[in-house]
Amino acid sequence: MSLTRSLAVSAFILAALADRYPKEVLWSDKTFGPDGPWRAVKTNIGGKEISLFPGTNWETWLIEDDYCGDGACYASEAGTHNRNKSGKTGNIDLDSNYSYFELGMNVEGGDTMRYVDDIEINGVTVTNASLALIKSPSSKIKYPGTTAPFFAGCLSVGSNHGEYQYFDSKTQGEEVKTSMPPGFLWDQGYTPSNSFGLHIGSVEPDFAGSLWYGGYDRNRVAGDTITNEGNFKDAVTTIQNITIDVISGKSPFDFNSTTTDLLAQGNTNEFKVMIDGCSPYLTLPKTTCDSIASNLPVTFNKTLGLYLWNTSSERYREIIPSATALSFSFTSKSNTNPIKIRVPFMHLNLTLTTPLVDTPTQYFPCHVNEGGKYVLGRAFLQDAFLGANWDSEVNKWWLAQAPGPNIANTSSVLTIETTDSTIRKGDTSWEDSWKGVWKDADITGDDSTTGDDKAKGLSTGAKAGIGAGVGVVGCLLILGAVYLWKRRQENQSPSQSQNEGLIEDQSKIQPDYQYYAPKIQELQSLPHYDSNTSWQSPSPSQAASEMQGSRPTPPELRGSEPTPRELQAQERIHEMA
Ligand SMILES: *[C@@H]1O[C@H](CO)[C@@H](O)[C@H](O)[C@H]1NC(C)=O
Ligand SMILES: *[C@@H]1O[C@H](CO)[C@@H](O)[C@H](O)[C@H]1NC(C)=O
Ligand SMILES: *[C@@H]1O[C@H](CO)[C@@H](O)[C@H](O)[C@H]1NC(C)=O
Ligand SMILES: *[C@@H]1O[C@H](CO)[C@@H](O)[C@H](O)[C@H]1NC(C)=O
Ligand SMILES: *[C@@H]1O[C@H](CO)[C@@H](O)[C@H](O)[C@H]1NC(C)=O
Ligand SMILES: *[C@@H]1O[C@H](CO)[C@@H](O)[C@H](O)[C@H]1NC(C)=O
Ligand SMILES: *[C@@H]1O[C@H](CO)[C@@H](O)[C@H](O)[C@H]1NC(C)=O
Ligand SMILES: *[C@@H]1O[C@H](CO)[C@@H](O)[C@H](O)[C@H]1NC(C)=O
Ligand SMILES: *[C@@H]1O[C@H](CO)[C@@H](O)[C@H](O)[C@H]1NC(C)=O
């Protein structure tokens, strides 16, 4: 490629890239659910603020005004949707299926309706979003001995089959094109890729959630990554074993460091689990829940299929604040050596409220029903980072240990490029991220420094400012030209890829999805094809695309786009060479 042409291309790419940033999703100040409480993200649909639990594939689930009948109901707290206000119909010739909503929960009664409507997310409108509406008041969650209504819907973070969902229309011969937020934001040129990074945080101790489309906060990754194919709501990740671990300090259990494998103890072999942000519990085989529970001061409640803490037991008061955790070891195609994700017991002291119980009751979220599906829901996601690059050439999703509340005060947001198949972890070790939060040996006799006090003060999500001015881009273009010219003279060999897995098999590229890729994306990949037959991508130095944003921010930042993109743009110039 001639110098002029590559310059023209890089100019175009720079200009295009300057507009694409990871998009933050903002969180509600309120918390929700009779089985949490849990954090939820804010959206605006039909001029109304609706809070949703994030973390489902495919369609976004909304509770309809109809569900509440004439008045307010539990779901009104998070906000319900009125389809009559959207002026759309959907006209889709296929109902949605409850069995895909809250996985691992049985649902009874009513039907769901596929629909399209616009969802405004932090100032940007996702047009014609794919929706499933819960409208029949007879639709309920079915517990072994009781039923309960729905409290909130669930926001899609995309799916491994591209940017859009297509359905047959009720009008013959037409196709209805519906969007999923991360795919739409990428396709429309807002974000750098069809991807997301999520950590839901926790209410107790207080730790804000983090959700980005097109990127992720590296500080929310505190361990090695389990890389998976398919969707996280499919059963693709294998649990090898489950143990209770003592991390530090005096053990409140009758063992000093770890239990034997609690799966095997319950005569259960490794099995596959689904991950679901719409679902609250750890839905596991009864034998598994029972063998975990045999180590804890809990009693099984048959009506709910849940375990209630014996709050008058001394051991309960010892276990919850201690440096102990329920540990899940996972394997996947990518890692045959198990990777552990630990959920501290402090996160497993959750609260049941009305209508599930009459008075607030502390419970341990192992859930048993006859559903036959094993699912790790929000109780688990308090301690897991979930992310994905849904780009058709990569199509990977990631699961990793999330940190405790004691992490850097700033977000460290990285862009997920279309070719990225790996993520980087933050600088704080998992153990350090819990220091000062739980009671362990180091601080015996000094109760005042323990527990929740320390965790407070970390407030809502970070705001990466963005606003690379036109002038800056201009300067960078000139810099880029000079740099490119120098590099040409040096006649260097193509740089090696740092990220394993970046080298993709050409045959995997699915032309179907490429069609929807905007021109910008095609140009962006031009330099890759440039370097001969071995299709090596110059490694996008992720480090350089870090955006440091100061954390605490008022919830309202509508329309204004986040900021220091300069670094990233500079690094881009290197890549062009
Ligand atoms: C929407 O319109 C339909 C038909 O007019 C009506 O039956 C339904 O009650 C309306 N729903 C709401 C929530 O207004
Ligand atoms: C919903 O999905 C379940 C499980 O895949 C299936 O058994 C059921 O028939 C489906 N229901 C409808 C209404 O399609
Ligand atoms: C949204 O759907 C409507 C109706 O099908 C269609 O006319 C419109 O072009 C769609 N908008 C976008 C941005 O695709
Ligand atoms: C745990 O450690 C203590 C002190 O080191 C020791 O006395 C005790 O025997 C150990 N218990 C078990 C079950 O290993
Ligand atoms: C958990 O499983 C791994 C792999 O199968 C094994 O190496 C490890 O010893 C197991 N841990 C326990 C406590 O059984
Ligand atoms: C709860 O713990 C207390 C104190 O250890 C004990 O007396 C009581 O029997 C326990 N209750 C249940 C239901 O196990
Ligand atoms: C369990 O959680 C409840 C509600 O957040 C809290 O009041 C209680 O102190 C916690 N229990 C322990 C032992 O920390
Ligand atoms: C189990 O939960 C149900 C429903 O909240 C409640 O009515 C019942 O009293 C509980 N049973 C026990 C033994 O705690
Ligand atoms: C963290 O953010 C808070 C709120 O702005 C600020 O008061 C505090 O000084 C910051 N702490 C550190 C260590 O930067």
Image (cartoon, rainbow, N blue to C red):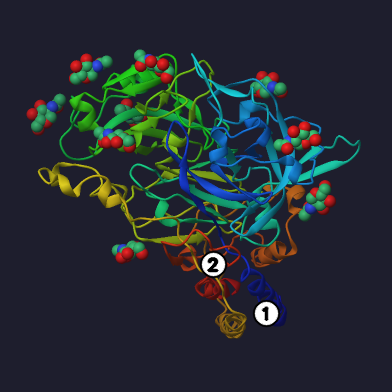
Q: Position of residue 192 (x, y in %)?
A: 61, 61
Q: Which mark is residue 562?
A: 2
Q: Position of residue 100 (x, y in %)?
A: 62, 30
Query: Residue 526's image quarter?
Result: bottom right
Residue that mark 1 sits on? 7
Q: Position of residue 324 (x, y in %)?
A: 26, 36
Q: Quadrant of ligand 7?
A: top left
Residue farthest along the front direction in this orientation: 71
Q: Quadrant of the N terminus?
A: bottom right
Q: Quadrant of the C terminus?
A: bottom right
Towards the viewer: 436 or 513 = 436
Image height of 426 relative to 523, above or below: above
Towards the viewer: 506 or 510 = 510
Residue 437 falls left or right of residue 156: left
Query: Few, some or many C-alpha atoms within 10 Å of disc 2 (few <14, some 14-19, many ≥20)?
Result: some
Mark nearer the N terminus (1 vs 2): 1
Image height of 377 relative to 555, above or below: above
Q: Is residue 268 at least partly visible in the picture?
A: no
Is the shortest distance between ligand 3 and the CB of mark 1 under 8 Å? no
At label 1, which amino acid type do we have?
Leu
| Secondary structure category for the residue under label 2 | loop
Image height of 263 relative to 414, above or below: above
Q: Is residue 447 at least partly visible in the picture?
A: yes
Residue 507 falls left or right of residue 157: right
Query: Residue 121's image quarter?
Result: bottom right
Q: How far is the residue under mark 1 from the one under mark 2?
A: 28 Å
Q: Nearer the viewer, mark 1 or mark 2?
A: 2
Q: How many marks?
A: 2
